[in-house]
Amino acid sequence: ILRAATPHEEPPANEPAESPVVIPSARQIVSIGSATDSYAFTFHEEELNAILSKIPPGWKVSVVSVVGAFRTGKSFLLSWFLRYLERHCVKKDGSSIACADGEATDKEWYERVQTLNQHEGSFDWRGGTARNTTGMWMWSDPYFLPRSSGEDVAVLLVDTQGMFDHETTVGLTAAIFGLSTLLSSYQIYNVDKRIQEDNLQQLALFSEYGRMAFEAEEKAAAMGVIEAEETAENKAEETSANAVKKVALGKEPFQRIDFLVRDWQNFDTEDETDIASMEQEMSEYLEHVLAERTASDLKETREQIHSCFKEVGCFMMTHPGFAVIKNKYEGDVSKIDSLFLRLLARYCERVFSSGRLQPKTVRGRELSAVELGTYIKSYALMFEEIGAHFPKAETLLEATSKANNANAVNVSVEAYAEVMNAVAGPQADNYHRPDELALAHKQASKRALMAFDEVANFGNRKGILDARNTVLAKIEKDYEVFISLNAGRNPLLGFETYILPTVIAAVSYFLRFIADFSCSSWSQTCRAGSEVLSHVYMVVFFFLLIVASTKAKQVSELFNRIKAAILVLSDGGDKKNIKRD
């Protein structure tokens, strides 16, 4: 979205036209429906790349996404998240951002918001019963928040299409929920009035393939180790069983999910300012909902949820006020219930607190923007290919492995280049003998492969080996470049231009000396030969003198190279003597 002057607002002739101002907005990274398929996924990679490019290289990224039934206030909630982040984020250099509206800071941040614009500066929202958001939308600008570890983290907000409307199939609902879960580090499941059993069953169903893919990945990794070390079939079965057991012991594939209960009506606390007591009620309610049941289907549902998410939380918010849910409501904050605002403020603090907000991780590895983009692209293209059908675990595993291997290749090649650039890169000054360069290449290759193995540690073994071969091929190609750069610094390079004339002059002078010493003074032939030889070395002398006068800088460099060459040759001789000793 661009804000520019209207045609009748042309600038004066003597003043330059102002460049259009880019207004932050929600950008659609996944759209639903096409001319031939109403439920087709379309991934908009250029939109995602434009957002991720705003995050400094190496910074870790946290993704907060909201999912849930349609018309339950997801976009409205995310718009409030934006207002909170605008007043609590830090700049890229770590300094605090001043209050945007310039009012006195004795007010709470939400009290300084006068209107929640439905379109500009917000995720698009509106009251009523009709579906509003379709596909998946990500806010165009990342926000930067401090972490408890001392590092800053970039925060991205994601809005999703509402589920369970009259136009969305179960398969499409599962795909939307699944993709949101795969890309987020903090998932918020919006539910209405209470956590019902069908909410738990839907969550268990939609996250099931994530657990299946994780188990398949563990089995593949375990089987790969066995293939390398042992071939006994009983040992393979035992290791595979242990891989499944690891999942039950806490290696959940996803990070955190919150049940956000909207329009809660059953707080026992009468004091509307006692938020702490209300939070205690929330914890007790969640504990009751997720308590172990004797019935097998209820028990399995809860076990499934705990096996997929490292943390499960709950927060409750009261009704925002009947004026808010009307079609004509346009965002006047004064019409929102005060308790709703206090609970909203507290929930924002919980979600974005430095101790709770964590970067997106895959197998314990915190992802940078580039790595996150690789994963999102891999998952989105997978859903784009299969459409609204429920993905198989093998398909998801393949997509995850492919993205992970791509990141492993990039990390390892960068590790190799970092070492070799310091030794023989474009900014290096010293020449290294071939054996020294080969040793540096060997050490850099070892470091690169170690970096590769740290990242590429799961998935299909053939895919990992192919990625490893890609790394080796790139390393060899880069090594040829470093050899060429190093050869250009060889102090002996180009000496033939000066050595050949010098040798000719020296030989001519030596032959003339012999001729003058041995020949008789009356011999005409000896005289002529001596003069010719004298002319030869004098011509060479004046040639070198002319070169020296016109290329003083090159001559200075030549003497430096001669000095370096002598050192190189002397070092080589010393090493040979040492070896002989």
Image (tube, grey):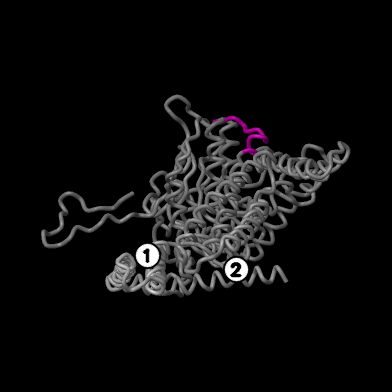
Task: Reply yes or no: does residue 394 show up in magenta.
Answer: yes
Q: Position of residue 495 (x, y in %)?
A: 42, 64
Please, what secondary structure does the residue beneath circle 2 have?
Answer: helix
Query: Residue at the top extreme?
Result: 36
Please name which of the two marks, 1 or 2, marks the residue nearer to the observer.
Answer: 1
**Magenta-colored stretch includes residue 113:** no
Q: Position of residue 110 (x, y in %)?
A: 47, 64
Dividing the picture into quarters, in which one does residue 552 lie?
Answer: bottom left
Answer few, some or many: residues within 10 Å of disc 1's Cα (few below 14, many 20 plus, some between 14 and 19). Answer: some
Look at label 1 and name its amino acid: Pro
Q: Residue at x 69, y 59 (%)?
A: 281
**Residue 72 numbered mark, or none:** none
The answer to whether any part of residue 204 appears in the image is no
Instruction: In this rendered view, identify the residue nearer to me: 64 or 223.
Output: 223
Give me the C-alpha separation between circle 1 and circle 2.
Answer: 26 Å
- N-terminal of the pair, mark 1 or mark 2, is 1
On the rendered image, what quadrant is the C terminus found in? bottom right
**Looking at the picture, how far across and down is residue 564, in whole percent?**
49, 72
> In the rendered view, does 73 fall on the left or right side of 227?
left
Segment tinted magenta in the rendering: 387-398
Q: Which mark is residue 572?
A: 2
The x and y percentages for residue 318 are 57, 54
Seen from the viewer's position, the closer of residues 488 and 443 is: 488
What is the quadrant of residue 202 in the picture? top right
Task: Identify residue type, mark 2.
Answer: Gly
Question: Which residue bears the numbered disc 1?
Answer: 501
Describe the element under mark 1 as helix, strand or loop.
Answer: helix
Q: Is residue 182 above or below residue 501?
A: above
Residue at point 79%, 51% (across, down): 249
